[in-house]
Image (spheres, rainbow, N blue to C red):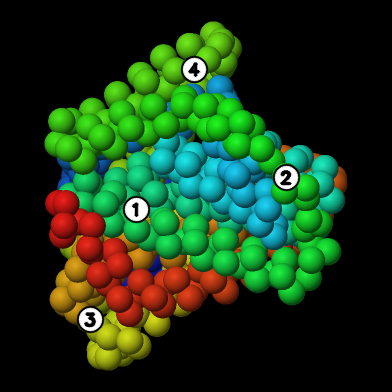
Amino acid sequence: MTDVAIGLSGLGALFVLIALRVPIAAALIGVSFVGIWFLMGWRVAWGSLGVIPYQFTANWVLSSIPMFLFLGFISFHTNLTRGLFQAARVWLSALPGGLAIAAIFGSAGFAAVSGSSIACSAAMGRIAIPEMMKHKYHPELATGTVAVAGTIGAMIPPSIILILYGVIAQVSIAQLFLGGISAGILTAIGYIVVVLVRVKLNPDLAPSRDASVGMAERLAALKETWPILLVMVGIFGGLFSGIFTPTEAGAVGAFLACVVATLSREMTLERFLTAARETMTTTAALIAIAAGASLLTRFLALSGAGDFLSDAIIAVGTQPVLLMLGIVLVYLVLGMFLEPIGAMLLTLPIILPVVDEANWSLLWFGVVLTKLLEIGMITPPIGMNVFVIKGVVGDLVKTGAIFRGVMWFIVMDLLIVALLSAVPQLILYLPMTFG
């Protein structure tokens, strides 16, 4: 058996293991270890198992991941973002589907401190869905809106996906964050358009509310946004002004969140320990997957399978449009069965050489890739955000109804991907201007 055949067989075995629900980290490490053993012998395989994951995880930038995760979990458990939704609810009450639009605004705000789609959906689901259900919103609109709005959490910085991509592709994290801002804002605008159009076409989806809200009430609602705004200003003001690095930004943000939660009397020892425990668990899982992906990269390089597949993809998709369509289809299919970070780390060893050969901007591609991965968070059958919302609403809304609710937004997501692909400057403008 040739080296390339061993590499391709290893990839086939990897997909079989993942289909059998073997944890992605274990599948990546196991297949890579056995594959290197076949290629180079057991001594090299054991040496690779000890050295390669260490070399990857010893990257200083990765230390920002637990900090941003802790920031997000603290914000989630201490309800720091509740004021954003309430303020948006008061100010947007006159719009068709105002509560759904307020949920999108609230999710965008929470995205600026969480970096996680799941945390974003869970936090806004607890706040916004009961409010919408109380005002007789259609369950599909209420749950679907919050499920898709959670995907903004991976677009607007700090984004865990963008951090990992930046480390692997060797792209500036700060530049990726700047590119993600415009894509995240464009996504939020697209979702708002979907809500407005749907409610205009069918007013029964979101019964109109009394819009006679006084200015005093509106200003009072704005005062409740200070906790999260203070954290956001601290993070982004320091990061984009160059005062501190992405890692330091995460640490400062987590510290500010703890201080603000304490001042607002939302912090308890139990909530602090819960956030810390969830941070450690999530960080360990992410690092294990990333370490396995680094081993897979070495295995594919040693076997030549990575170059073989990259060359095959380039040969099939000689036209940039066809190549991009192929990449979009690959990630849409993977998103149906894999969680985003696993899908990204599994494919980057093959896709990055293709992007480089096509002379595409790695910065632009990283943001578009993140958008594609987040579509997978709401597509059946695995759409994780949908099941997070199902956990929030319980038996009140069926899973199928939530999936039906997100379908309208998936169409908008695909249009946004097409727009970002056709006009890369939408992503690159901020990094080029302020980078």
Q: Residue at x 30, y 67 (%)?
A: 426
* Residue bearing mark 3: 311
Q: Closer to the N terminus: mark 1 or mark 2? A: 1
Q: Give the image location of residue 60, x and y in percent.
A: 19, 34
Check whether the beta carbons of the residues at disc 1 and disc 2 lie within 8 A of each other.
no
SS for callout 1 = helix
Query: Of 241 and 224, which appears nearest the observer?
Result: 224
Measured Cα–Cα span from mark 4 to mark 3: 52 Å
Comparing labels 4 and 3, the label whose residue is closer to the camera: 4
Q: Is residue 23 left or right of residue 183?
A: right
Tell me the SS state at disc 3.
helix
Question: What residue is disc 4 on?
Answer: 261
Label 3 or label 1, whichever comes before in sequence order: 1
User: Comparing marks 2 and 3, which lies closer to the viewer?
Assistant: 2
Where does residue 396 sit, x and y in percent of width and height?
A: 85, 46
Is residue 238 or residue 386 the one in the foreground? 238
Residue 106 location, x and y as percent? 55, 43
Determine crowd level at label 4: few under 14, some 14-19, many 20+ residues with C-alpha closer than 10 A: many
Image vertical order of residue 283 relative to residue 160, above or below: above
Disc 1 + disc 4, Cβ < 8 Å: no
Q: State the separation of the CA atoms marked 1 and 4.
A: 25 Å
* Mark 2 to mark 3 CA distance (whole Å): 62 Å
Please give the name of the residue rendered at 25% of the width and 90% of the height, measured from the top-left corner.
Answer: 318
Label 1 or label 4, whichever comes before in sequence order: 1
**Of discs 1 and 2, which sits in the foreground?**
2
Residue drawn at point x = 27 percent, y = 85 percent = 320
Residue 53 falls in image quadrant: top left
What percent of the width, then of the height, locates residue 124? 61, 41
